[in-house]
């Protein structure tokens, strides 16, 4: 799993590429941990190249979302595949996240 | 056999001895009662004899006394005349004449004066005697002769001596016809009180024999009359009458002591009774005196006469008793014979049962020990049990693994007993032989059938089910030969579809058709013989399939299932005897079956291997990528859960994952040997909760539940198994 974090103005873009299975999620979680401090702004989760996500991955999304909520920022989930949308739907995440194409 | 024969003879002897003892006891009892009866009968008869004898003696005495009294009176009444005539001695013959004339019983009379009383005649004893045929004329004689010497005679001296009337000893009258006589003499005193002489009256005793012998109270009874000195006055032995004394006779007799005692008593004038032995026979003697005369009478009655009644009865009773005892002996003998035969039969039966038990043990030893079947294998949990009926039966099962294939069979030989168990042994041997090189159940069954039909002369057949389970992929091929179909245990319970074909050994060359199916992880087969479903309780109800299925629900260890069924059968049957062998075989397939399987360790990095595994499953089953990804997700969630929580931190553990296809279902199994944990019991995640309320965790199980169509958990033999099914 590749993680690419880019900052542009007050917008942080996290590009996730590959399979976000549990071992991958553990690594990603560590990498994204500092982002929680900057959650007052906008974080764009670019999922266009993410092919798979497990519940561990979803937990990263959720914990970021919670951090943003307390800091007054927002999370935008961008370009998720239909399959992952399904997973979001199954877990009720579609209601928790702003999803953009 | 020699020992056995002598034991038999000994038993017969002992039994016969018991029988004879019984007869003896019966005889003794019978005899004792009849002896008691006899004793009282004898007592009665003795009393009767005594009574009859006494009354006879009474009658005799009174009849004799009639004569005696008449005679005495006849003499006494004339004493005063004789006294009065003492002064006129010449008139004394007239007195004697008067005595005789006035009294018909008297045949003679004398007035005998004391010598010298009459001055003219020193001896004077005028005698008047009845003569003539009718005794109606009288003759006068004188007893005062030189040769007779009357003053010395007893009849003269005794009355004067004792100063009262006296009966003389009987004697034979020499002058008057040789008849026995006796004389009654009364003393005569003159007016001065001096003894003057005696007045006598003679009576003949020839009537005594008639009187006494007149009547016999028993057929062989005898009456004897003795004088006071023991002279025989009356006796059946005529030669002794008036010639011999009883003392002379008795001294010649065998039982003289008894006789002497009796004689003494008789001569003392006593009344009594006694017993004597005459010529070896017992006799009863009753005796009584005749008053005043000094005579004594006795009646002698043979013992046989007294008891002739009961002697006759005795014989009859004895005859009946003997008859009864003989019958008892015969009955006892036949009873003992019967007993012998029975015990012989019993013995034979016991021996046979012993042999059958050995046969049963041999039979049991032929089937594999089911307690721990293949404990080393993780892909198989199986157990088997035969609960043999008391009588050796013909059930069999067998199994073995060759080339990762489980060969198993169950069978029921028609009939029971040793023949059935032999056929069972043959069947089992053939199974082993045929299955050692052949994988196809139908060919194995055909081979077995042909061999058995060939040598089956007893028209015995075997219902048989043979299965070959490929443990690597769960493929089951099987062939049924007339046996009841096994129960298949998947997510439900049903009869494994079988072609009935024919039992083994009926028709040579019969084309048996095999069948096939696939088992997946956690499927099980339950094979049984009809001894189970047809187990009968006391009310003749059958155990039946419903009760059997109730014990098959859920998954326990194979052994627990069998124990459960056995307990249920025992509870159901109660005390009713088990009529048939009961055989069960439980095969629980725990392999991954056809499809993919992999083994992981409890390291979270292993999760990365799942993708490749799931790609293969998706490929094999032609899954679209979306579904493939979802299934991947579900399996990952379940596996992560296990890796994270099943084993204590720092310990290594194994996780087995399998995926197989069953019709339109994809079945995933996840097994671990860690602590028991049932993820299906986890609380449902609330996916509609607000952001604030959403917990960070708990989504994994939720995803598994959401993606899969069925999730079940089972813990068995220290193993957690999570089965997940997806309908595709």
Image (cartoon, coloured by chain):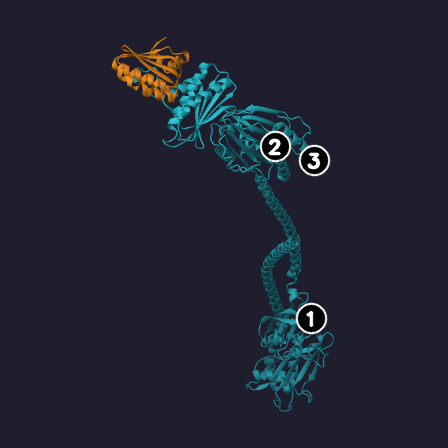
Residue B366 location, x and y as percent? 58, 39
Is the residue at mark 1 from the same chain as the one at mark 3? yes
Residue B139 location, x and y as percent? 71, 81
Residue B50 sits in quarter: bottom right
Q: Residues within 10 Å of mark 1 (few under 14, many from 20)?
A: few
Residue B98 location, x and y as percent? 65, 78
Instruction: Report whether residue A15 is seen.
Output: yes
Tint applied to chain B in the drawing: cyan
The alpha-carbon separation of the residues under discs 2 and 1 comes to 124 Å
Residue B646 vs B727, above or below: the answer is: below
* Residue marked by disc 2: B435
Q: Which label lies toward us, 1 or 3?
A: 3
Chain where mark 3 sits: B
Is the residue at mark 2 from the same chain as the one at mark 1? yes
- First in residue order: circle 2 vs circle 3: 2
Horizontal side of residue B432 vs B613, given as left or right: right
On residue B457, the disc is 3
Residue B195 location, x and y as percent? 57, 86
Residue B504 vs B247, above or below: the answer is: above
Where disc 2 sits, the SS reads helix
Chain where mark 2 sits: B
Closer to us: B583 or B254: B583
Tell which chain the image draws in orange: A
* Residue marked by disc 1: B210
- First in residue order: circle 1 vs circle 3: 1
Residue B277 vs B552, above or below: the answer is: below
Where disc 1 sits, the SS reads helix
Disc 2 and disc 3 in contact, CB within 8 angstroms: no
Q: Residues within 10 Å of mark 2 (few under 14, many from 20)?
A: many
């Amino acid at each position: 799993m590749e993680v690419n974090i880019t900052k542009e103005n007050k917008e942080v873009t996290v590009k996730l590429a590959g399979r976000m299975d549990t071992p991958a999620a553990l690594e990603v979680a560590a990498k994204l941990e500092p982002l929680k401090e900057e959650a007052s702004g906008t974080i764009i989760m670019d999922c266009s190249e993410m092919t798979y996500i497990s519940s561990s991955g979803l937990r990263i999304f959720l914990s970021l979302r919670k951090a943003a909520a307390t800091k007054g920022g927002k999370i935008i989930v961008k370009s998720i595949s239909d399959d992952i949308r399904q997973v979001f739907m199954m877990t009720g995440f579609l209601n928790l996240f702003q999803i953009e194409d | 056999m020699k020992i056995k024969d002598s034991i038999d003879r000994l038993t017969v002897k002992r039994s016969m001895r018991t029988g004879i003892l019984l007869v003896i006891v019966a005889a003794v009892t019978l005899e004792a009662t009849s002896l008691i009866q006899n004793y009282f009968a004898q007592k009665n008869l003795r009393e009767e004899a005594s009574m009859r004898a006494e009354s006879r003696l009474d009658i005799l005495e009174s009849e004799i006394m009639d004569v005696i009294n008449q005679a005495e009176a006849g003499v006494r009444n004339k004493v005063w005349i004789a006294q009065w005539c003492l002064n006129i001695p010449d008139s004394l013959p007239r007195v004697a004449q008067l005595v005789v004339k006035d009294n018909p019983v008297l045949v003679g009379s004398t007035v005998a004066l004391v010598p010298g009383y009459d001055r003219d005649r020193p001896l004077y004893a005028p005698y008047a005697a009845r003569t003539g045929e009718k005794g109606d004329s009288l003759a006068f004689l004188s007893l005062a002769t030189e040769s007779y010497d009357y003053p010395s005679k007893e009849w003269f001296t005794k009355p004067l001596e004792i100063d009262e009337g006296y009966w003389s000893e009987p004697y034979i009258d020499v002058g008057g016809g040789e008849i026995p006589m006796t004389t009654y003499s009364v003393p005569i005193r003159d007016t001065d009180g001096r003894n003057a002489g005696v007045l006598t009256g003679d009576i003949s005793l020839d009537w005594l024999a008639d009187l006494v012998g007149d009547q016999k109270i028993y057929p062989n009874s005898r009456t004897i009359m003795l004088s006071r000195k023991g002279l025989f006055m009356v006796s059946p032995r005529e030669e002794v009458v008036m010639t011999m004394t009883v003392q002379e006779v008795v001294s010649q007799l065998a039982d003289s002591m008894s006789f002497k005692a009796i004689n003494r008593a008789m001569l003392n004038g006593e009344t009594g009774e006694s017993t004597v032995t005459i010529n070896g026979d017992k006799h009863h003697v009753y005796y009584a005196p005749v008053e005043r005369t000094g005579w004594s009478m006795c009646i002698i009655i043979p013992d046989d006469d007294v008891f002739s009644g009961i002697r006759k009865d005795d014989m009859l009773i004895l005859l009946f008793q003997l008859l009864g005892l003989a019958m008892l002996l015969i009955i006892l003998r036949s009873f003992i014979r019967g007993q012998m035969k029975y015990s012989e039969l019993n013995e034979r039966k016991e021996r046979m049962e012993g042999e059958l038990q050995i046969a049963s043990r041999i039979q049991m030893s032929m089937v594999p020990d089911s307690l721990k079947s293949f404990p080393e294998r993780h892909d198989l949990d199986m157990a088997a049990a035969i609960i043999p009926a008391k009588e050796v039966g013909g059930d069999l099962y067998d199994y073995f693994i060759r080339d990762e294939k489980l060969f198993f069979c169950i069978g029921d030989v028609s009939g029971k007993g040793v023949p059935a168990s032999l056929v069972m042994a043959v069947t089992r041997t053939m199974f082993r032989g045929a299955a050692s090189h052949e994988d196809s159940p139908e060919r194995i069954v055909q081979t077995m059938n042909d061999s058995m039909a060939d040598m089956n002369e007893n028209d015995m057949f075997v219902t048989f089910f043979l299965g070959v389970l490929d443990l690597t992929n769960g493929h089951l091929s099987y062939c049924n030969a007339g046996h009841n179909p096994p129960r298949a245990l998947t997510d439900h319970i049903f009869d494994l579809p079988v072609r009935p074909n024919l039992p083994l050994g009926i028709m040579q060359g019969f084309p048996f058709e095999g069948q096939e199916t696939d088992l997946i992880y956690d499927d099980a087969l339950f094979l049984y013989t009809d001894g189970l479903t047809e187990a009968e309780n006391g009310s003749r109800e059958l155990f039946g399939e419903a009760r059997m299925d109730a014990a098959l629900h859920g998954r326990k260890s194979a052994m627990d299932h069998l124990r459960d069924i056995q307990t249920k059968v025992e509870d159901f049957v109660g005390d009713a005897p088990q009529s048939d062998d009961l055989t069960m075989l439980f095969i629980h397939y725990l392999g991954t079956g056809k499809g993919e399987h992999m083994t992981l360790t409890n390291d979270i990095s292993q999760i990365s291997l799942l993708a490749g595994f799931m790609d293969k499953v998706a490929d094999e089953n032609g899954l679209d990528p979306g579904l493939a990804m979802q299934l991947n997700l579900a399996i990952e969630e379940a596996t992560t859960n296990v890796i994270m929580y099943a084993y204590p931190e720092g310990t290594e553990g194994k996780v087995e994952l399998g995926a197989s296809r069953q019709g339109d279902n994809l079945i995933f199994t996840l097994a671990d040997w860690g602590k028991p944990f049932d993820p299906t019991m986890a609380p449902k995640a609330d996916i509609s909760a607000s952001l604030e309320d959403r917990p960070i965790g708990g989504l994994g199980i939720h995803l598994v539940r959401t993606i899969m169509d069925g999730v079940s958990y089972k813990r068995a033999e220290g193993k957690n198994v999570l089965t997940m099914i997806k309908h595709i």
